[in-house]
Image (cartoon, rainbow, N blue to C red):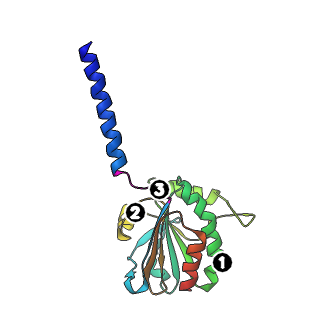
Amino acid sequence: MKKSVLVIIAVVAVIAVTYLADRATRQPRKSHIRLTVSNSAAKPAPEVTLKDLDGKDLSLAQYKGKVVLVNFWATWCEPCLVEIPWLIEMQQKYAAQGFTVLGIAMDEEGASVVTPWVKKERFDVNGSKSQMNYPIVIGNDAAADKFGGLLGYPTSVLITRDGKVVKRITGIISYDEISKSIESQL
């Protein structure tokens, strides 16, 4: 009887200590993290070449002279799916002014999953069903590392016409905030 009481007390003590330690070290939950880099502190965008959905090389350098929103995403990522219609709309709205979204799909299975998914999926954009209308490449950890690593999906990086990183957003973007940031670079 004494042993079972001691075991129960020990288990309760371990649970209490674990709970208190968790509360003491827990970070406040945020739906998104924003990091804005001033133009004077902007770093050059990395040199990255990845395969597009047709298996052809696509280099970030090909977009020099354009404002580029690099968007790391995955087909299974719920916040990414919320963002995609906004990205389609931004591509439609700003492409003629020298802007493009560059989607970097980070699915582990690569093109075998991403290509049919992109061809099949349609998104509600201003009342009509639209396909992703911007270039998609198949990403990997090496590409993510060149951008400073990823803490989660989606992660978006805004690059100026002269190839400088001016904004990085981990988590879902704010449509209004990213639109203003894009417009400030056009």
Q: Is residue 71 above or below residue 109?
A: below
Tell me if residue 4 is in the magenta stretch. Answer: no
Is 29 in the magenta?
Answer: yes
Q: Which of 184 and 148 is in front in this view?
A: 184
Picture coordinates of residue 9, whole percent (x, y):
29, 25
Q: How far apart are marks 3 and 2 (CA)?
A: 13 Å
- Quadrant of the frame with the N terminus: top left
Q: Look at the numbered disc 3 and give the secondary structure of its residue.
A: loop
Q: Pinpoint residue 79: horizontal percent, then vertical percent.
A: 55, 57
Q: Residue at x 37, y 83 (%)?
A: 41
What's the distance in space between the residues labelled 3 and 1, CA to CA?
Answer: 28 Å
Binning the other alpha carbons within 10 Å of mark 3 as few (below 14), some (14 to 19) or many (20 upward) gives some
Q: Tell me: 66 left or right of 46.
A: right
For residue 101, which quarter of the picture? bottom right
Q: Nearer the viewer, residue 53 or 21?
A: 21
* Residue that numbered label 3 is attached to: 107
Residue that numbered label 1 is attached to: 93
